Amino acid sequence: MTSQTASGPTPVTLLLPRAARGRQAWTRRAFRNRMALVGAAIVIMLVLLALVAPWITPARYDRTDFGDAWQFPSSRHWMGTDGVGRDVYSRVIYGSRVSLLVGFTAQALALGVGLPLGLAAGVLGGRVDFAVMRAVDALTAFPQLLFALLIMVALGSGLGNILLAIGLHAWIPICRLVRAQSLREREQEYAEAARAEGAGEIRVVLRHILPNLLAPAIVAVTLGIPQAIFTEAALSFLGIGIKPPTPSWGQMVGVGVNDIRFYWHLAFFPAVMIALTMAGFVLLGDGLRDVLDPRSART
Amino acid sequence: MGRYVVSRVAAIVGTLLIISLLVFVLMHAIPGGPFDEDKMPLSPASKANILRSFGLHRPLWQQYLLYLWNAAHLNFGVSYQRPGESVIGLLAHVWPVTMHLGGMALGIALVGGLGLGVCAALRQNTSTDYLATGVAVFGLVAPHFVLGSLLILLFSTLLGLLPAGGWETPRNWILPVLTYSLAPLGVVARYTRVSVLEVLTADHVRTAWAKGLSARRVVLRHVLRNAMIPLITIIGPLVPDLLTGSLFVEGIFRVPGLGHFFVTSVYDRDYPMIMGLALLGTLLISVTYLASDLLYLLADPRIRYL
């Protein structure tokens, strides 16, 4: 493939696509930031809903009322009721608690494991690097869902085991990223300057390199949250995640999809909430990358 | 080159060994066995007989070594949930359906994603661009089971246009393939857009315009060929995902493929089938990674990591 055909003196004239670039880059960034704001608004709204759930729902999520079962959405039950007469709206609101809890906690765990390991691999190199990267390679090659399934069936359903099943894979991208970044950062001039001033290697890593790693790590964590939320929803959809009567959106879709031809509202509302939540975090993460990590923001 | 490939293949064999041990330990750590009372009521004597016939009475380390020995001779055992059918036979039976579904989804994702990404890049910041970004983000954020449920709701329940499940006629294929292809289509479109935008500003493209080449020729010959290179690493990992099937898509649309065996095998403690699925998945992932690395090497003569 002969791609580098540019020979001779490069003409200085700007071509059309470039000429219009200044203005376009500006509108583009404005658009992206607007999307990031939308994402942030969705996330904040969800957190608020999860916090004030008891005060904005008409009934507790597990209150059954068999005389009121299989109701379609109405002014009394905004999202209808399910087969045992539970209010779907209440369950959807309470369900945000599980999704957010799993998303934040799993990524906190992933950061707690991935950041130190990635930093150790990148800075220490040698055997540490080899060991960490082989573990990363082996886990990468493992079919993720089968792994999560085995763990959930072996240990039983429940929040802690879900976090474990998600966490075992979630630290990998963060570890990779931190390792690659630390390899690059420690050769940068500022690190060299710090060393020249007589700073020890530990001080260089902790005071100078680590702060520069945090921004891309935060972006990776934000973009990992929708992944964690997705995995929880998928496990609950299969009936091995969150146990009823505690509501989780994935579990509600999994149960509701059986009756989707007659009672569409059972699967529809939690499905929309899953998509909305993931969209919120993805948009927020993309926006954060533009702000925090300008080097890779040229998208 | 030859030595590089050999060392990579050796690494794959090593990975398979590690994974096989990991899965073996994990699946035997699950309480309960394949022939417990709740699954089939048997007298203690006949249960002991069955256990012996499957070699399950031996200590675990012997079972593991025996499995490795047999696997090295391409004998992966007999599935417990389908008595009489070997794991290989069962896979040969159900995997083609999954590959059919995954192959069609992959084709649509590649063609659609590339087209959408190129259009978005060429018309940057127009409504085409925003539409492409919108589709890409939606593909990323709507899990299969969410998208599948919504599509059934719209096209089967509300409009009555398409069947909600089954795999008999091409009409049955539309919804599952659509569900399955949107996420990878979004991924491909996003990365194509970025990659094409980057190449568009390169010197050789400016030269091509300056030579007075037609827009079609510039895009196809000079932009797309170079923009494809970074895409190889993005497309690679999509392949094993799509070909091992989604138990969600296959479950929702009742496609008789590989997908639901992931769940039933774990539930039934079908040890040979669990091992078979894990090794198949691992092998596919490793081989695609190797293939995409080699393709990368062939596609871009500037890259040398040997």
Image: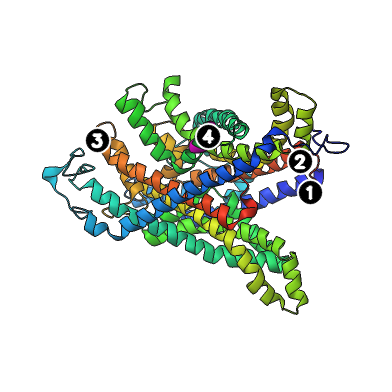
Q: For marks 2 and 4, give the one nearer the viewer.
A: 4
**Does dot 1 land on a helix, a strand or a loop?**
loop
Q: Can residue B244 be seen by looking at this rendering? A: no
Q: What is the CA distance from the residue labelled 3 to the residue labelled 2?
A: 53 Å
Disc 1 marks a residue whose amino acid type is Tyr
| Mark 2: few/some/many CA within 10 Å (<14, 14-19, 20+) | some
Please give the residue where the numbered disc 2 appears in the rendered image. Answer: B297
Q: Check residue A226 for magenta coloring.
A: no
What's the magenta region?
Answer: B128-134
Q: Are marks 1 and 3 on the same chain?
A: no
Position above or below: B284 against A170: above
Disc 2 marks a residue whose amino acid type is Leu
Q: What is the CA distance from the residue labelled 3 to the residue labelled 4?
A: 33 Å
**Does dot 4 land on a helix, a strand or a loop?**
helix
Front-most of residues A292 and B230: A292
Residue A66: x and y, percent?
13, 45
Please give the residue where the numbered disc 3 appears in the rendered image. Answer: A263
Front-most of residues B277 and A277: A277
Circles 1, 4 touching at the beta carbon (< 8 Å): no
Dot 1 falls on which chain? B
A193 to the left or right of B110 = right
Circles 1, 2 touching at the beta carbon (< 8 Å): yes
**Does dot 2 land on a helix, a strand or a loop?**
helix
Q: For marks 1 and 4, give the one nearer the viewer.
A: 4
Please give the residue where the numbered disc 1 appears in the rendered image. Answer: B305
Name which of mark 2 and mark 4 comes first in the sequence: 4
Q: Can residue B264 be seen by looking at this rendering? A: yes
Please give the residue where the numbered disc 4 appears in the rendered image. Answer: B132
Q: What is the CA distance from the residue labelled 1 to the residue labelled 4?
A: 35 Å
| Mark 1: few/some/many CA within 10 Å (<14, 14-19, 20+) | few
Disc 4 marks a residue whose amino acid type is Ala
Disc 3 marks a residue whose amino acid type is Tyr
